[in-house]
Image (tube, rainbow, N blue to C red):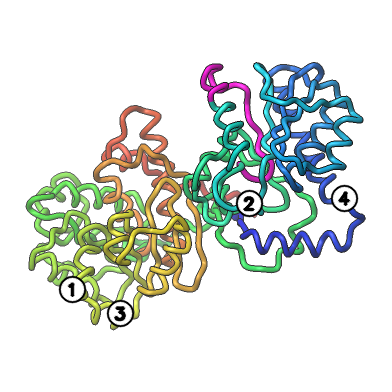
Amino acid sequence: MRAAWRVADVRSAEAALMARLPEGTLMQRAAAGLARRCAQLLTTRYGRVYGARVLLLVGSGDNGGDALYAGALLSRRGAQVHARLLSDRAHPRGLAALRRAGGRVTPALPARADLVVDGIVGIGATGGLRAPAAEAVAALSALRARDGGRPPVVAVDVPSGVAVDTGDVPGAAVRADVTVTFGCLKPALVLGPAAPRAGVVDLVDIGLRPYLRATPAVEVPDLADISAWWPRPAPDSTKYSRGVVGVATGSAGFPGAALLSVAGAEAGPAGMVRYAGPAAREVVTAHPSVIVSPTVGQAGRVQAWACGSGLGQDEAARATLRAVLAAPVPAVLDADALNLLVDGAFADALRRRDAPLVVTPHDREFARLAGRHPEPDRLESALQLAARMNATVLLKGDRTIVAAPDGRAWANPTGTPELATGGTGDVLTGLLGSLLAAGVPPERAAVAAAYVHGLAGRAAAAAGPVTAAAVASALRPPPPPPPD
């Protein structure tokens, strides 16, 4: 599990570490890591560092200092390093080091470069880039557009112009191919529209981790985490002991939602799927192993419910949701189930629930539930809704966020824009319900479902245009963790 910390916590840790080190040590560590990554990129792309043309975009402060010191190291290896100073307050020692190593200052962007280092602003900046930095970034973007995406851009700590704590992009900002970040991840590298701008993130250890005392802002799972959480049958397992998931989705007008959510549930770890609803005939035809019934009350015993996809908003849908909320088992609510909550008619039922609840809104559904659209700080918006509803919130998006009522949060690293197509959320709902039925805690179930669903979306996209059925077919459990 990786973790990202807010700027204030990073600054506090840096201060504590610097108090124990000789002056300038931290910057030298950062610059060495940055130069090493730049040299690797040059060697991989061009076969050499010697003679390579490196452009530094340098702002004021320590971020620019990191770039200048790294430029000096590259210059000593024979690179032709030019610095475009975007402030009259460039780091003086770093600039002197660059000049001593043979680097030069240039008044404008050169016509050609083999590598660009973005050292404009770091984690202390707020708001979008301003002139002349914004003009330099626009010129760089035009250069890359003309030259097929070249030269590659390496960002120092974070891409300049992004909102570091939220992942928002409030204005002009750099789009990097690689971001070399120091000490720990920052939220903008894993959240929101800023995350794709970071490219490949390379974390350089500068000794900061022991000094990060605060709770991370957000965590990012990896495959090992998901694999460790994913239930697997034991030799003595039965279909009942593995968990039975109930699926209350679909309607006469939307039977496809029932089929897709059941497909998602069957791909999960639960041992049996029970379907309750008006699409029973369609479901049992497509999924003969599913036990069907017309209503939740007639479905029999389950360990979790998945409810809402294609349910409609008529009285029958209300009765279904009422029965699901009354059941003393975990439940995941999606789509129409969320819309039915908006008018407050189910407020008492929600308050009476003791079992875990997971809600899976996209932005428009979030706005109906919360009374406003997610703020640029999507993480904080999700956490506020989770606390208000006393539910785990899976806020869908390119970087899906899972927020727990106790203040913990996770960012999913596997999503793809290709999942923005009808019915894929229905598949996710069924898969999440299956994980809940298998006994996975709600926040882990939400994180694991989003992760595997994202992988399935990528697999489906690799095979052609993405459909919800293709995503369901591509769902696979993660490989088991290696033995101890």
- Relative height, residue 263 to residue 406 (above, below): above
SS of the residue under disc 4: loop
Contact (Cβ within 8 Å) of mark 4 with mark 3: no
Q: Which callout, 3 or 1, points at the residue further toward the start of the chain?
A: 1
Q: Position of residue 382 (x, y in %)?
A: 42, 63
The tag on residue 24 is: 4
Q: Which amino acid does label 3 sit on?
A: Arg
Q: Mark 3 points at which residue?
A: 353
Earlier sequence position, callout 1 versus callout 2: 2
Mark nearest the camera among 4 and 3 is 4
Q: Bounds of the magenta span? A: 142-159
Count neighbours of disc 4 (C-alpha within 10 A) and say few if under 14, some if 14 to 19, many if 20 or more. Answer: few
Of residues 188 and 275, the one nearer the viewer is: 188
Sequence-first tag of 2 and 4: 4
Query: In the rendering, at what x and y percent does residue 478 appear?
Result: 47, 47
Q: Can you identify the residue that label 1 sits on?
A: 322
Look at label 1 and name its amino acid: Arg
Image-quadrant location for residue 220? bottom right
Q: Can residue 358 be seen in this view?
A: yes
Q: Which residue is drawn at 83% across and 51% down?
A: 26
The answer to whether marks 2 and 4 mark residues whose Cβ atoms lie closer than 8 Å is no
- The quadrant of the picture occupied by the C terminus is bottom right
In the rendered image, which quarter is residue 311 located in? Answer: bottom left
198 vs 205, left or right, is: left
Query: Badge 2, how many Cα within 10 Å: few under 14, some, many 20+?
Result: some
Q: Is residue 382 left or right of residue 15?
A: left
Q: Say whether disc 2 or disc 3 marks the residue closer to the N-terminus.
A: 2
